[in-house]
Image: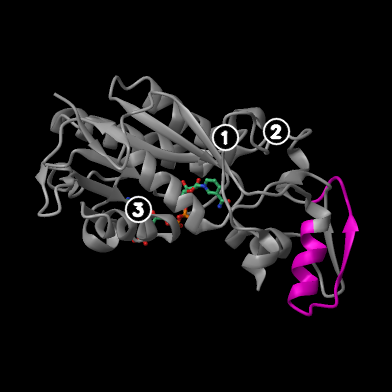
C-alpha cells in the first residue's frame, strides 16, 4: 500500500486528518533554531504533528537526555541542530550528537532521518566546520537508517556575521569567493518538503537564485544598510578564503529558491 502527501509517496504514516491528508509525526531536533522553528511551523500548518526538541525542552543530543522519549512514535526525525562553535570542537559535537541520535533512531525504528548540510561541504577540508559537517553526513549515510540530506548554500541571514569577522571601522576585507545566498525561509521550505516525502537515500541541493562574488555581496549589503565602510578584495580574509573555485554553488538538479537577496534586504 502506498499513500501520497503533497505529491510525495510516503510510508509508515500515522493516520488521516479530517481533510483526508495523512498525518505524520516529526521529531525536530534543533526545532527551536533559525531553520528548525520554521520547519516545525511549516509541517504543523500542513496538518502534520511536528514537535520541536532542544536542550531548552529537555532534549540534549550530546548527553542523550530525553532522546528516547522525543523519538517515541515519530515517523521522521529531522536534525537541525548546530554546533556552538565552528572550530575543531565542532567535530566532536557532530560525532557525538549523530552517534547518539542514530542509536536512538534505530532503537525507535525511525523510517526517515533528515539532516541539513552545506553545498560543497566535502570540497573544503581545510575548514574544521566543513569537515565536521561532512562527518555528520557520513555517519548518517553509514547508519543503515533511511535518510535524506538537504545541502543548502549560505543563508542570507548569515551574511552580516561573515562581514563582521573581517571588518574594522573603515574597511571590510573579503575574498571573491562565489556565494549563492538563500533565504532561511526557502531552506526551511525545502527541508519541510523533503522531510514529508520518501527518503532520498541521497542528497538534494538547494540554493538561492543568484551567485555573487563575496566582495560584491558585501558591497550590496553595506549599501542597503547605509553603512559607509568600503569593501577591499583580500583573498586571504576569513573562512571563505579556503574555498577554491565555485564549489559552494549548486550544480545541475538543484532546487533553486525564489527569494532574491536584493528583495530580501528590503
Ligand atoms: N548558516 C548557513 O549559511 C548554513 C548553510 C547550510 C547549512 N547550514 C546548517 O543549518 C543547520 C541549522 O542551522 P541554524 O542556523 O538553524 O542553527 P541555530 O539557529 O543555531 O539552531 C541550532 C539548534 O540546535 C539546538 N541545539 C544546540 N545544541 C544542541 C544539543 N546538544 N542537543 C539538541 N539540540 C541542540 C539549539 O537549541 P537551543 O535553542 O536550545 O540552544 C537550536 O534549536 C546547521 O547544522 C548548519 O550547519 C547552515
Q: Is mark 1 within 8 Å of ligand 1?
A: no
Between marks 1 and 2 in the image, the one whose residue lies nearer the viewer: 1
Q: Quadrant of the C terminus?
A: bottom right
Queried whether the magenta region covers residue 262, the answer comes back as: no
Residue range of the region highlighted in magenta in the rendering: 217-237
Name the residue located 17 percent from the left edge and 49 percent from the top edge. Answer: 66
Q: Position of residue 176 (x, y in %)?
A: 84, 47
Q: Residues within 10 Å of mark 2 (few under 14, many from 20)?
A: some
Check if mark 1's residue and mark 3's residue have beta carbons within 8 Å.
no
**Of label 1 and label 3, which has the lower sequence position?**
3
Q: Residues within 10 Å of mark 3 (few under 14, many from 20)?
A: many
Please tell me whether mark 2 sits on a helix, a strand or a loop.
Answer: loop
* Left or right, residue 236 beside residue 86: right
Q: Which residue is mark 2?
A: 247
Name the residue located 79 percent from the left edge and 77 percent from the top edge. Answer: 227
* Left or right, residue 168 beside residue 140: right
**Of label 1 and label 2, which has the lower sequence position?**
2
Between marks 1 and 3 in the image, the one whose residue lies nearer the viewer: 1
Q: Which residue is mark 1?
A: 254
Q: Gap between marks 1 and 3, in whole Å?
A: 25 Å
Between marks 2 and 3 in the image, the one whose residue lies nearer the viewer: 2
In the rendered view, tell whether residue 86 sits above or below residue 10: below
Please state which of residues 224 and 121 is positioned toward the viewer in this rendering: 224
Q: Position of residue 199 (x, y in %)?
A: 33, 29
In the rendered view, tell whether residue 172 sits above or below residue 192: below
Queried whether the magenta region covers residue 231, the answer comes back as: yes
Q: Quadrant of the N terminus?
A: top left
Name the residue located 40 percent from the left edge and 59 percent from the top edge. Answer: 33
Q: Is mark 3 within 8 Å of ligand 1?
A: yes
Q: Gap between marks 2 and 3, in whole Å?
A: 27 Å
Tag shown at residue 30:
3
Amino acid at each position: 500500500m502506498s499513500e501520497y502527501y503533497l505529491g510525495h509517496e510516503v510510508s509508515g504514516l500515522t493516520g488521516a486528518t479530517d481533510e483526508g491528508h495523512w498525518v505524520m509525526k516529526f521529531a525536530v531536533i534543533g526545532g527551536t533554531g533559525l531553520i528548525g522553528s520554521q520547519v516545525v511551523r511549516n509541517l504543523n500548518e500542513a496538518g502534520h504533528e511536528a514537535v520541536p526538541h532542544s536542550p531548552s525542552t529537555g532534549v540534549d543530543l550530546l548527553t542523550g537526555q530525553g532522546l528516547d522519549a522525543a523519538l517515541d512514535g515519530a515517523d521522521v526525525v529531522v536534525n537541525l541542530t548546530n554546533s556552538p562553535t565552528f572550530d575543531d570542537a565542532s567535530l566532536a559535537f557532530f560525532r557525538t550528537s549523530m552517534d547518539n541520535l542514530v542509536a536512538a533512531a534505530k532503537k525507535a525504528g525511525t523510517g526517515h532521518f533528515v539532516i541539513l548540510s552545506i553545498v560543497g561541504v566535502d570540497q573544503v577540508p581545510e575548514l574544521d566546520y566543513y569537515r565536521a559537517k561532512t562527518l555528520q553526513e557520513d555517519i548518517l549515510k553509514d547508519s543503515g537508517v533511511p535518510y535524506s540530506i538537504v545541502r543548502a548554500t549560505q543563508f542570507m541571514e548569515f551574511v552580516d556575521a561573515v562581514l563582521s569577522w573581517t571588518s574594522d571601522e573603515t574597511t571590510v576585507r573579503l575574498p571573491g569567493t562565489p556565494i549563492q545566498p538563500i533565504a532561511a525561509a526557502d531552506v526551511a521550505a525545502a527541508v519541510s518538503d523533503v522531510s514529508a516525502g520518501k527518503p532520498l537515500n541521497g542528497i538534494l541541493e538547494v540554493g538561492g537564485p543568484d551567485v555573487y562574488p563575496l566582495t560584491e555581496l558585501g558591497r550590496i549589503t553595506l549599501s542597503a544598510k547605509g553603512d559607509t565602510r568600503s569593501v577591499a578584495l583580500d583573498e586571504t580574509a576569513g573562512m571563505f578564503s579556503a574555498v577554491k573555485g565555485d564549489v559552494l554553488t549548486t550544480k545541475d538538479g538543484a532546487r533553486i529558491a525564489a527569494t532574491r537577496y536584493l528583495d530580501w534586504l528590503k
